[in-house]
Image (cartoon, rainbow, N blue to C red):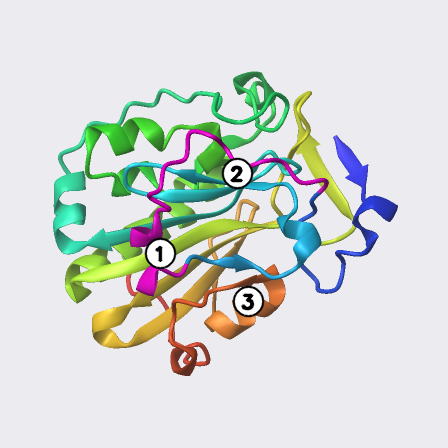
Amino acid sequence: MTIRIKAVFAALVGATCFIPAVASASPLSWITSNDCSQFSPNGRAPVVVNAKMRASTQSLCYSDFAVLHSGITKGPLWSAEHLTAQHVDDAKNNTRTNRFFAEHQLPPGAGARLEDYKKSGYDRGHMSPAGDRWSKKGMAESFSLANIVPQNPSNNRRVWSRIEESVRRLAEESGDAYVVTGPLFSGRELQTIGESRVFVPTQLYKVVYLPARKLAFSVVVDNTATDTYTVKTVRELEAMSGLQFPGIPDALKDKRIGGLKGV
């Protein structure tokens, strides 16, 4: 299904990529005083700059990653994790569950359902990857559809998988890494799947911050059967996403790297 974004989203199209939103929902009662700040550098989570884009979002705090979920896109706007070398090592021996589930902690109609992905032609693509999960609980939680977006199957299993592995390698080599992963939605006509109308991203991104190396960068991949990716500065990703990453030192946001070794 392809939908045309008209007046509801018109005020949000200030940049090439945007994320739509609607009326606000009250915070989830199950979220504890732990605000998941441990998954963001200096405890400062990514910020959705546009107030209208923030309106329908809800924070979900899991055991080893955090999600900002949108009741319009029916998926995450970002999913944040803090990987250490020990986490990556522990994750190698963690068993993948493959048990996807609808997030029952969301209000009715706010999230995706398993049926939405059936015969859609898209994979259920993790944002915080199952391959990063170092605990059994975190592994199970990562299969929540609140952490999932519709992803091109070839993309998910090839270039995106290699990017995820490269980030794990960087975390091991550097000691730790703060990683934020999410979808981008570009243009006025966006595809959706299922009766819930789950938005299909046009692109996917990762923002990686390596504190020990004083290095930060972003990776952007078209949500197609591609084998290529683009490395951007954090500042460039902020401009195209409508997000800001206040935990990353401002002096690092314009630095550029050549590429991800091995991808």
Q: Residues within 10 Å of mark 3 (few under 14, many from 20)?
A: some
- Position of residue 50 in the picture relative to residue 145 (left or right): right
Q: Amino acid at mark 2?
A: Gln
Q: Nearer the viewer, mark 2 or mark 3?
A: 3
| Coordinates of residue 75 in the picture (x, y in percent) | 55, 36
Residue 27 is covered by the magenta coloring? yes
Q: Secondary structure at mark 2?
A: strand
**Label number found at residue 179:** 1
- Taking the spot 28% from the left edge, 53% from the top edge, the residue there is 82
- Taking the spot 57% from the left edge, 16% from the top edge, the residue there is 115
Q: CA distance from mark 1 to mark 2?
A: 19 Å
Q: Residues within 10 Å of mark 1 (few under 14, many from 20)?
A: many
Q: Main secondary structure of the magenta part?
A: loop
Residue 116 is covered by the magenta coloring? no
Q: Secondary structure at mark 1?
A: strand
Q: Amino acid at mark 1?
A: Val
The vertical placement of 198 against 174, above or below, is above
Q: Amino acid at mark 3?
A: Glu
Depth check, front residue: 47 or 119: 47
**Label number found at residue 151:** 2
In magenta, the rendered stretch is 22-44
